[in-house]
Image: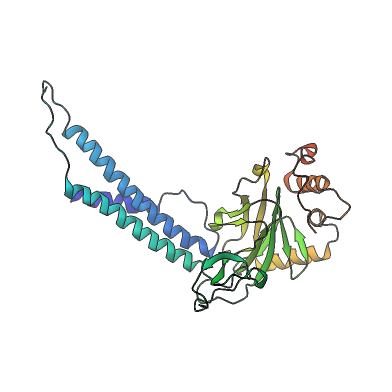
Amino acid sequence: MLAGISLTLVSIWYGQNHGLLPVAASEEASIIDGLFNTMMTVSVGLFLLVQGILVFALFKFRRRAGDRTDGPPIHGNLALEIVWTAIPAVVVLVIGVYSFEVYNRLGGFDPNAASDRGVEVAMLPGDNSSGLIDAPKPHKMAGHHHMALGIGAMPGEEGTAADLSVDVMGLQYAWIFTYPASGITTGELHVPVGKEVQLTIKAQDVIHAFWLPEFRLKQDAIPGRDAELRFRPQLVGEYPIVCAELCGPYHGAMGAKLFVHSPEDYDNWLQQQVASNTNPTQVVAMRPDDRSEADYLALIVEHLMGDSVAPEALAQLHPHHSTMP
């Protein structure tokens, strides 16, 4: 009993104090952290239990000095096998239900997310009770509807507009951010603290993955498909934006910054961008028709990535790709 109590206390303590996660910078991060901490608690408990039994058996049932006899002919233990099968099954079931609930709380089942493009889901013909959005008419199939990609509004807030909307374009090897309300295009993402932000994520060429480690959010950017991420930043600061999908030879250099400002600082930044006509990241993002793809990518490297990629290497990258408008 004492061993069981000690095992439980150690597992719970370590599960809540492991220090493996970065700072939680969004409202959604605490929800994800709760799931992660639960999984860590269960994992540590099972690890200590299994290893403890192994160490105990190592000493308890070791061969004694001078003992040359065979071990007892044990062929199995049905009760023990049922126990060690049932316990993992129950753990997996509980974690699965918890994960489902977390995904729902984050807005993963918002049918209004990402407009009308998403994952095709088979349904009964004429069944519209779920409220899922119909497929675009040119591609509509009988008995099918479309579910949005990404994380939408939290339950109870479906159909409401976010405080700030930003279009995100992933391309080899940069992230481009466009603010439709103000017409600003930049290579950095700036958002106000405490406001709900909606990102509409696309890809121009290959599959990328938009990852915000401190926000516990990640979403694939797929060519020809729209995905959505909605979140509410809670801490002012500077955070990395990482591409978490191998997208080419310079995948490691594909990164950007997310800046969370106070409302006053965000308004000042917005006014500066509107007033500025020489923003270098705007020049990079808006590609003239007479500029080659190699020159365009070279500007992205110069302004957003530094000198880590040789310009001559860019000229060899996918000349068949379509250009940005």
Say which of 191 and 122 sits in front. Answer: 122
Among the 4 quarters of the image, the one containing residue 281 = bottom right
- In the image, what residue occupies the spot 31% across and 49% down? 45
Is residue 3 found left or right of 314 in the rendered image?
left
Say which of 200 and 203 sits in front. Answer: 203
- x%, y% of residue 114? 62, 68
Say which of 141 and 315 sits in front. Answer: 141
- x%, y% of residue 213? 56, 53
Residue that sits furthest to the right in the current view: 290
Is residue 302 found left or right of 158 in the rendered image?
right
Residue that sits furthest to the top in the current view: 66
- x%, y% of residue 241? 63, 53
- x%, y% of residue 34? 42, 60
- In the image, what residue occupies the spot 50% across and 76% down? 130
Is residue 133 found left or right of 293 in the rendered image?
left
Among the 4 quarters of the image, the one containing residue 98 = bottom left
What is the quadrant of the C terminus in the image? bottom right
Residue 230 in view here? no
Residue 82 in view here? yes
- In the image, what residue occupies the spot 53% across and 57% down? 216
Disc tally is 0
Among the 4 quarters of the image, the one containing residue 36 = bottom left
Q: How is the image coloured?
A: rainbow
Say which of 125 and 8 sits in front. Answer: 125
